[in-house]
Amino acid sequence: MLQSKNYLQLLQWIGLSENSANIYLNLVENGLSAISDITTQTWLHRMQIYRLLPYLVETGFVFEVLKGKRKFYKKKR
C-alpha cells in the first residue's frame, strides 16, 4: 500500500491527475483490462474513465487493444 501511494505521488508529480494515475496503476497491477474492469477495480465512474483514457493513450502511458468489437487497455512497457 505504501509503495502504491509513492507511485501515485510520483505519477502526480510528473503531471497526471490523481484519477489518471489510479487508472495507470490499476493497469500496471492487472494488465489488459476493459473499461468495465477498470471501473470495478478503481471505483471511478465509467464516464471519468472514458474521459481520461484518451489522454493516457495520447501521452503514451497506455495503449488500446481491439479484440473483436471490444476495446481493452494496457500499460506500455
Image (tube, helix red, strand yellow):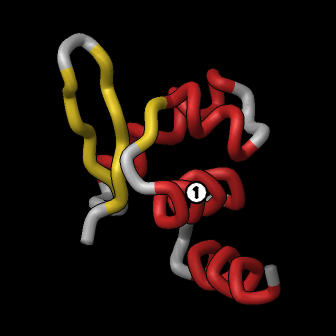
Against 13, is 17 above or below? Answer: above
Q: Nearer the viewer, residue 36 or 15?
A: 36
Q: Is residue 22 left or right of residue 76?
A: right
Q: Residue furthest top?
A: 69
Number of callouts: 1
Q: Position of residue 35 (x, y in %)?
A: 51, 29
Mark 1: secondary structure: helix
Using the rendered view, name the quadrant where residue 37 is placed: top right
Indicate left or right for 43 with 47 as reference.
right
Residue drawn at (37%, 47%) of the image: 32
In percent of width and height, residue 54 lies at 38, 38
Answer above or below: position of 35 versus 24: above
- The residue drawn where x is 41% and y is 46% is 55
Residue 30, placed above or below residue 10 = above
Count neighbours of disc 1 (C-alpha within 10 A) and say few if under 14, some if 14 to 19, many if 20 or more. Answer: many
Q: Would you say 7 lies left or right of 33 here?
A: right
Residue pointed to by mark 1:
26
Q: x and y percent of residue 33 in the render?
A: 44, 40
Quadrant for the C terminus, please.
bottom left
The image quarter in which residue 72 lies: top left
Where does the N terminus fall, quadrant-wise?
A: bottom right
Question: Which residue type carries mark 1?
Answer: Asn
Decide which of 66, 44 is in the foreground and name it: 66
Left or right position of 17 against 69:
right
Which residue lies at the image location 54% right of the left edge and 70% below the top edge?
15
Residue at the image position 70 percent from the left and 60 percent from the top = 18
**The one of 31 and 61 positioned closer to us in this rendering:** 31
Expressed as whole percent of the image width and height from the top left, the position of residue 50 reads 52, 27
